[in-house]
Structure formats: C-alpha cells, structure tokens
Amino acid sequence: MKMNRTDDLLWLALEEDLGHGDVTTDSLVDAESMGEAVVFGREPFVISGTYPFRRVFELLDPAVRIEWLARDGDAVEANVNVCRLRGAMKTLLTGERTALNLLQRLSGVATLTRRMVQEISGTKCRLLDTRKTTPLWRLLEKNAVVHGGGTNHRFGLSDGILIKDNHLAAVGGIGEAVKRAREKAPHTLKVEVEVETLEGLEEALHAGADIVMLDNFSVDMLREGVARAHGRALIEASGGVKPETVRAIAETGVDFVSCGALTHSARAIDISMEFCS
C-alpha cells in the first residue's frame, strides 16, 4: 500500500487511540460480522476532510467501502447523510473516533471560513489563512480553508518573504531588511513587510515592499493606509479579525485580510456516525 505524509499522520492518530488494541470491540464483535453506517452532522456545516476520513478506514482495512453523498466544500444541512460506509463491524468501530475527529475539525475550519468569505462578499478583499495551524495538520487545515472559499497564505517559511517585527529588531529597520531580502532571496519571491504604524507603512513603501501587512490597525487607520499606499503595494490587514469585524475591515479597500482564527480557533462540527439496523 502506497504511503505518504498524510498516511504517517493518520497512523500516528490511530496508534494514539488504539494503544494495544480496541479491547471493547475485540471482546464484543466477531471478526466475520459485517455492517453499514451513515455519517451526518447535527448542525448545518461545510464539509471538509473526506480524504483523511476515508483513508483512516482504508489503512485499517482496504475492503471498507465508502459512498460519498457530499463533496469537500459542499454546504450540508443538519441530519443529512454525507456518506455511507460498508465493511467489517470491527473496522468501522475501531476507526470511528479517529475518522470523525478529522472530519469534525476540518469541517469546522471550512465552515468558519465560508462564513467569513460570505461576510466580505462584494468587496475586492480576499480572505487569507496563516501559519497558525495545528502541528502536522497544516496541509489538511489549509485544504479546509480552500474548501470554505478562502485563500492560502504561505504554506511554510520557504514560500515567501514576510518580514515581521522580530526580524526588524534583529536587522535594524525596514529599509535594511527589504534591501537584504532583495539581495539574497530568489527574485521570484515577493517581499512582504508587517508594520504597526502609518510611519512604518511609509517606510515600507519607500523601501519597495510588494505587500505591506497592517497589523492591528483600526478601521480608520486601515482606510488611511490604503489611501497612502495608492496602489504602490498590495495591502493586507491582520489582527482582531472576526466574523463580526471582517466586513468593516474589507470595506476599507485592503486587498487581503488574514485571519489566524480560521485554523487556530474554529469550533469542531458535531458530526456522528450511526450504524444501520
């Protein structure tokens, strides 16, 4: 069976749950017993995580069959089945919790993302995620953001130059930091600078930054920042971004709004698996 990094993660999750074996299922269920189950949410949600959900059962038993009734990115109503599973009862019971944990968590990310994307509908602003992800879950969580309609920011440190406050403290200033980035980094990478004041914005623009992140600016300051930039750089807003605030932020004219809460604070969806009688 071909393995990949996601499989490694899923095996770790299964081993965490299984320990030395599923003693309850092993005690009660015969190896020959076959069963069928359905999966549904107890609340409306946007589904994400169908691949890792399926893969959990495949790793335990390739004979398990799953019929999907919804695809990643679909909006699903409460109590509507999203898939049917058929296979050995022991496999379905043993993999249930791990598979549901993945589906619940990733659907939560997709659902929050969809809500915020809808909030900024009609503006030019795009919703970005961040690197504030669960360790080892980054690919899964960033996929969930895309399923919700959001856009991925950097996947990792090698994907772009983002000069933040601690970089500036180490180097000595925005101008010098941008200069070094231009000299030493691949020419294909854009240079983004995080600033906390309008003066910092002016310095970043003068230094030739491609993107300027305005961190924890008020709505009025964001509007002023967009006016000062006047198209010389793309403008990204960050800090204090919530469903209740994102519309006002987007309406200032920023190009992007980045939100760590998409992946670090999304609530897991209440999803259940029930066996058919």
Image (cartoon, rainbow, N blue to C red):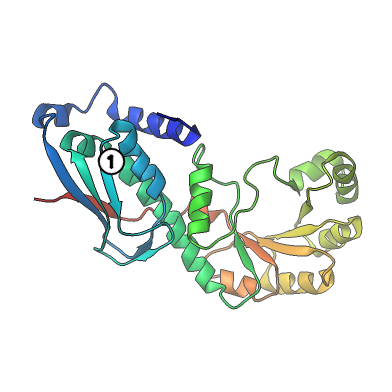
Look at the picture and state if 64 lies above or below 18. Answer: below
Look at the picture and state if 206 lies above or below 106. Answer: below
Image coordinates of residue 80 in percent, x first then y, are 25, 63
- Give the amino acid at mark 1: Arg
What residue does disc 1 label?
97
Question: Which residue lies at the image location 11% right of the left edge and 35% below the top edge?
Answer: 33
Image coordinates of residue 240 in percent, x first then y, are 59, 61
Please name whichever residue, 206 or 222, is drawn nearer the observer in this view of the structure.
206
Question: Which residue lies at the image location 59% right of the left edge and 78% below the top edge?
Answer: 122
Question: In the rendered view of the protein, which quadrant contains the N terminus?
Answer: top left
Question: Which residue lies at the image location 17% right of the left edge and 47% below the top edge?
Answer: 36
Mark 1 surroundings within 10 Å by alpha-carbon count, few (fewer than 14), some (14 through 19), many (20 or more): some
Image coordinates of residue 93 in percent, x first then y, are 20, 38
Residue 188 relative to residue 216: left or right = right
Numbered disc total: 1
Question: Which residue lies at the image location 19% right of the left edge and 49% below the top edge?
Answer: 37
> Which residue occupies the extreme top position in the image?
20
Please name whichever residue, 261 or 9, is drawn nearer the observer in this view of the structure.
9
Secondary structure found at label 1: helix
**Quarter where residue 99 is shown:** top left
Residue 21 relative to residue 238: left or right = left
**Quarter where residue 22 is shown:** top left
Please name whichever residue, 30 or 104, is drawn nearer the observer in this view of the structure.
30
Please name whichever residue, 187 or 167, is drawn nearer the observer in this view of the structure.
187
Image coordinates of residue 173 in percent, x first then y, are 87, 47
Residue 142 relative to residue 86: left or right = right
Residue 71 relative to residue 211: left or right = left
